[in-house]
Amino acid sequence: MTADTGDMAVKVRRQVEIPVLGGRYLATFITFDNLADGKEHFALALGDWQRSEPLVRMHSECVTGDVFMSARCDCGPQLEEAIVRISAEGGLILYLRQEGRGIGLINKLDAYALQDEGMNTYEANRALGFEDDQRDFTVAAEMLKALGIDHIRLLTNNPRKIAQLQANGIHVDDRVGTRVYRNAHNARYLAAKKEEGHHALESDDESCCPAHSKF
């Protein structure tokens, strides 16, 4: 399975089965060669992922949220929700190495310090000389094409992801919203995502359970 990218084709490198979430779910981790940005992005295939219109989530790496269950964002709960929902419906998580909306871990922590002084997440990025969101989702389209997938249902609240995928030849036939994991520590962050990032947080008045507790 390949996807053309200039002189080199994106290819599936390896597929390895790994039990996740304490062994409750079985994921096939898929790695790729020749992705446009050269980073180590990978996919988790869950359930009947080769079905037509698989459910897909593009999840950007968040060390603080995914690993340490930080309450300053909603990344950890969203990742767990994606594993559970996609395992049931069949699809993929594209785990993208784009920490801090593309600015990296160290810069993200610098942005956190500015947020502690009163800035919101976008204002902090701008103060550090970055765009609101520096991520390029071209690689996500490359990964899907290498797997022979060009029609998906996308698990997201972020319209920017839909626009970029469609611009790169992936048909997003349906958007499936993720739950809103709001708490006292991330309320301002989520408000900024809705007001400035135009995220579709339809249920933002619902306080959901923290990561690693509900499912």
Image (cartoon, rainbow, N blue to C red):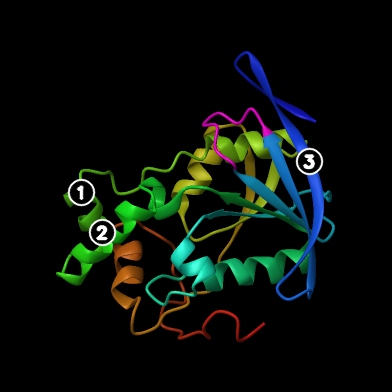
Residue at the spot 63% in from the left edge and 33% down from the top edge: 142
Q: Nearer the viewer, residue 60 or 177?
A: 60
Sequence-earlier tag: 3 or 1: 3
- Mark positioned earlier in the residue sequence (2 or 3): 3
Quarter the C terminus occupies = bottom right
Instruction: Residue 196: give x, y in percent of width and height.
Output: 28, 58
Mark 3–mark 1 contact, CB under 8 Å?
A: no
When the figure is inspected, residue 138 is found, relative to residue 64, above or below; the finding is: above
Which residue has dot 1 on it?
128
Horizontal side of 133 relative to 139 (left or right) equals left
Please give the label number shown on residue 3.
Answer: none
**Which residue reaches farthest top?**
7
Q: Is residue 166 above or below residue 47?
A: above
| Residue 166, position as x, y percentages in the image | 56, 38
Question: Which SS class for mark 1?
Answer: loop
User: Tag 2: residue type?
Assistant: Ala
Within 10 angstroms of label 3, few (less than 14), some, or many (20 or more) residues?
few
Question: Range of the magenta residues?
Answer: 33-40
Mark sitting earlier along the chain (1/2): 2
Q: To which residue does mark 3 refer?
A: 14
Residue visible at 53% across and 35% down in the picture? 138
Q: Position of residue 212 (x, y in %)?
A: 60, 81
